Image: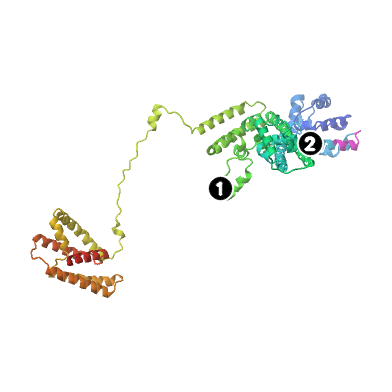
């Protein structure tokens, strides 16, 4: 709103001026001047160009100064003056009834509200939001109607539902056939292929369905008519949505398709609101519930939302869907901003970005195989790895839990065993010496007998320490058997003994003395067997 500071009360046609201001206020808010406003300003201001014009909007003042070369003033004092003028409007304007002023105020309020809420016909993305919402509702209703039609007519002719898979063809066939008895005389060549038509006629003759009345068939036909009409209207609505999307957001349509682009705009509220979102938000737009659930449970966040239904993401393998959705969201965000804020209406940028994404997709699917030159191959060669560290063998001696006395006995055994092994190796080539070794156990001198008695006494003392479940009677019987065997062996003993045998006996005696006190049961059994063989 504008006025001349000193001349407003003296204007005879002030009511006309005020009407012009009210009618042109939406344009004034945008900083535009109409022809009628230019005429009024020229008449009022051009006569006294040296005066200043009080302006309530700085943007409008700049336009007036540029086009009419009139100095304008915008300050807090001017805003206070405008408030006073509005409060005393009826007294300042003559010849204008209060009833007309209230009507003009109501019209002004409506036009400003329409402008603020963006109900203007220029806001065409609202049509896209409504169209995609209606399209989704039609899909749901169509599914319900078709399911009900198949179930209803299936009581009469159940075989038809398995033969004809297409929903629209099924409804058209049911509408034309009616009762299944009419299939033989009806021509279905316009609706179905020849093979399926023959199969339907054959199935109608042997159908297991129940009989229904004509009234039931009429109701089913009405339902089929509804399904066919809704399907045709859905096709028209899809064409309308496709045309609107190509007019409003051509680059976004090329990138993600008409339906996905329309759903993104509908989810954001408008194309301008969608342009304000970053690419990361565009990527997961529509998966907010999964996102907040993942953040709450500290799990992986979703990789895609509505953009998952785009053709580029759909034709990608499962392992590359996340990468492609991220790249597609980045390019789609650029396309949205270009469509919302740019002046051009062509789709060149969308076509170029889609070609780049398709090339990147092929590269990912082929696992990024690239050719390497000869120098690159030479640089890529790596020497074979060789492990050069020293291998240390684990020493188990520190893990022993045997008492110190027994450990000393084992150490002595380890020192004696190599000597015994070397002597046994010398005996192997001589067959006679092997026979002597078999009879050595029975050939014992009285000295050996005494040593054995000492050994038996030592064994008894150790067996008392070690918890072995053997009774004293069994021990006495064993001692008696050993003594009897030694006495018989002394009677059959040969007087001829070589020096070698004496050495062997002494070594055997030393081995027996140095054996561990806790002797195993297997060695005892071997000794008993040898003593019995000698007795035989």
Would residue 397 be found to the left or right of residue 104 on screen?
left
Q: Position of residue 456 (x, y in %)?
A: 21, 71
Q: Residue at x 58, y 37 (%)?
A: 325
2 vs 1, front mark: 1
- Whole-number angstrom distance, CA of label 2 to CA of label 1: 48 Å
* Location of residue 273 by image quarter: top right
Magenta residues: mostly which secondary structure?
A: helix
Residue that badge 2 annotates:
112
Q: Is mark 2 in CB contact (under 8 Å) with mark 1? A: no
**Marker disc for residue 132:** none
Tell me which segment is drawn in magenta: 94-104
Q: Is residue 75 visible?
A: no
Element under label 1? loop
Q: Position of residue 417 (x, y in %)?
A: 20, 58
Residue 461 highlighted magenta (yes or no): no
Badge 1 density bin: few <14, some 14–19, many ≥20, Cα 10 Å: few
* Location of residue 230 by image quarter: top right
* Location of residue 337 by image quarter: top right
Element under label 2? helix
Residue that badge 1 annotates:
299
């Amino acid at each position: 709103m504008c006025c001349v500071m000193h001349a407003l009360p003296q204007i005879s046609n002030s009511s006309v001026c005020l009407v012009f201001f009210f009618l042109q206020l939406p344009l004034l808010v945008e900083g535009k001047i109409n022809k009628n406003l230019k005429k009024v300003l020229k008449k009022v201001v051009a006569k006294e160009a040296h005066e200043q014009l009080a302006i309530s909007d700085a943007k409008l003042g700049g336009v007036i100064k540029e086009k009419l070369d009139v100095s304008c003033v915008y300050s807090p004092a001017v805003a206070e003056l405008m408030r006073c003028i509005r409060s005393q409007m009826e007294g300042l304007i003559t010849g204008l009834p209060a009833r007309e002023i209230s009507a003009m105020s109501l019209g002004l309020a409506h036009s400003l509200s329409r402008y603020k809420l963006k109900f203007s016909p220029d806001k065409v993305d609202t049509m896209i939001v409504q169209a995609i919402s209606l399209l989704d509702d039609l899909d749901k209703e169509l599914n319900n109607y078709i399911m009900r039609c198949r179930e209803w007519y299936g009581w009469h002719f159940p075989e038809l539902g398995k033969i004809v898979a297409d929903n629209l063809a099924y409804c058209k066939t049911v509408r034309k056939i009616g009762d299944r008895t009419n299939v033989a005389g009806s021509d279905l060549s316009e609706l179905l292929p020849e093979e399926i038509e023959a199969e339907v006629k054959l199935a109608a003759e042997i159908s297991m369905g129940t009989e229904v009345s004509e009234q039931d068939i009429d109701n089913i036909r009405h339902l089929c008519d509804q399904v066919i009409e809704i399907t045709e209207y859905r096709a028209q609505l899809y064409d309308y949505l496709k045309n609107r999307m190509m007019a409003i957001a051509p680059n976004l349509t090329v990138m993600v398709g008409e339906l996905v682009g329309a759903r993104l705009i509908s989810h954001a509220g408008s194309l301008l609101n969608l342009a304000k979102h970053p690419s990361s938000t565009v990527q997961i737009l529509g998966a907010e519930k999964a996102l907040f659930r993942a953040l709450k449970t500290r799990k992986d966040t979703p990789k895609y939302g509505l953009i998952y239904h785009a053709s580029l993401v759909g034709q990608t393998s499962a392992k590359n869907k996340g990468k492609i959705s991220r790249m597609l969201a980045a390019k789609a965000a650029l396309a949205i901003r270009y469509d919302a804020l740019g002046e051009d209406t062509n789709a060149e940028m969308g076509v170029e970005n889609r070609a780049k994404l398709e090339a990147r997709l092929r590269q990912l699917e082929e696992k990024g195989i690239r050719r390497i030159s000869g120098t690159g191959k030479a640089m890529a060669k790596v020497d074979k790895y060789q492990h050069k560290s020293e291998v240390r063998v684990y020493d188990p001696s520190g893990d022993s839990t045997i008492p110190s006395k027994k450990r000393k006995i084992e150490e002595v055994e380890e020192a004696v065993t190599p000597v015994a092994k070397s002597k046994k190796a010398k005996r192997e080539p001589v067959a006679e010496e092997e026979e002597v070794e078999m009879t050595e156990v029975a050939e014992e001198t009285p000295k050996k007998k005494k040593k054995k008695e000492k050994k038996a006494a030592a064994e008894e003392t150790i067996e008392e320490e070690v918890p072995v479940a053997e009774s004293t009677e069994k021990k006495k019987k064993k001692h008696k058997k050993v003594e009897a065997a030694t006495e018989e062996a002394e009677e059959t003993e040969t007087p001829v003994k070589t020096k070698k045998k004496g050495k062997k006996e002494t070594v055997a005696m030393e081995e027996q003395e140095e054996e561990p006190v806790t002797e195993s049961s297997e060695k005892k059994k071997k000794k008993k067997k040898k003593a019995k063989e000698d007795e035989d």
